[in-house]
């Protein structure tokens, strides 16, 4: 595992180190699930992302821009060494994450491997650029988004995507939802909470 490039990333690494040390010293079993970029909402539109204040999380910004709550969407950096110059992330749908939690619990309850610590990456294994998600959002929703490319944010990494192969193999888990579904559920949630 390489060094974290931001304080946020470092807090995740430190947390994993603490869990590992505790599990191996106390003879318990532990699993860490590394989420990549969770987006979407439950298909019922009863559960979704509700930031307490405005955040730069991509999906709430997209949905709020689409319904007119956010006048302009900032895209941070257009000069990265990627296909379109914007950051690339691995977006994972929240119900896929919920299924991964159930699979991890099943693994913890099976066997008697006390003192073990395992880590699984939860993502699709496919990177999507910020402009790609904007364009897909416009296609799926029919909305025309108002956005501008601004300076990079400090700490943003150019490209991050998961290698979920260990979760596929050991948990029997893989992401099932595509980007269109993630957008549809997130937009349905945003519309519901604004009724």
Image (spheres, rainbow, N blue to C red):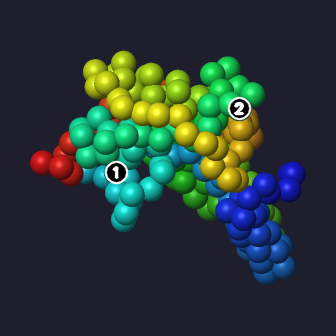
Residue in the foreground of this view, choosing between 189 and 95:
189
Give the percent coordinates (x, y) of residue 162: 69, 39
Q: Quadrant of residue 81?
A: top right
Residue, far bottom: 26
Give the residue displayed 31% in from the left and 24% down from the top. 144
Q: Foreground mark, 2 or 1?
A: 2
Q: Quadrant of residue 62?
A: top left
Q: Can you identify the residue that label 2 sits on?
A: 80
Residue 43 seen by the camera: no
Q: Which disc number belongs to residue 48?
A: 1
Give the percent coordinates (x, y) of residue 136: 43, 22
Residue in the foreground of this view, choosing between 146 and 167:
146
Residue in the foreground of this view, choosing between 74 and 110:
74
Label 2 close to label 1 by CB (< 8 Å):
no
The answer to whether 137 appears left or right of 168 in the picture is left
Residue 97 seen by the camera: yes
The answer to whether 46 appears left or right of 195 in the picture is right
Q: Quadrant of residue 26?
A: bottom right
Callout 2 secondary element: loop
């Amino acid at each position: 595992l390489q060094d974290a490039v931001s304080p946020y990333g470092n807090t995740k690494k430190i947390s994993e180190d603490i869990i590992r040390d505790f599990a191996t010293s106390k003879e318990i079993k532990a699993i860490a699930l590394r989420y990549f970029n969770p987006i979407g909402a439950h298909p019922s539109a009863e559960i979704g992302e509700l930031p307490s204040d405005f955040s730069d999380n991509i999906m709430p910004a997209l949905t709020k821009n689409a319904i007119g709550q956010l006048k302009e969407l900032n895209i941070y950096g257009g000069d990265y060494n990627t296909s379109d110059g914007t950051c690339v992330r691995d977006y994972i749908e929240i119900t896929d994450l919920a299924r991964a939690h159930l699979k991890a619990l099943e693994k913890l309850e099976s066997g008697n491997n006390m003192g073990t610590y395992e880590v699984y990456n939860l993502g699709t294994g496919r990177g999507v650029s910020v402009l790609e998600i904007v364009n897909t959002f416009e296609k799926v929703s029919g909305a025309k988004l108002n956005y501008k490319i601004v300076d990079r944010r400090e700490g943003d990494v150019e490209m991050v995507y998961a290698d979920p192969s260990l979760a596929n193999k050991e948990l029997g888990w893989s992401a099932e939802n595509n980007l269109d579904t993630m957008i549809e559920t997130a937009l349905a949630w945003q519309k519901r909470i604004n009724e």
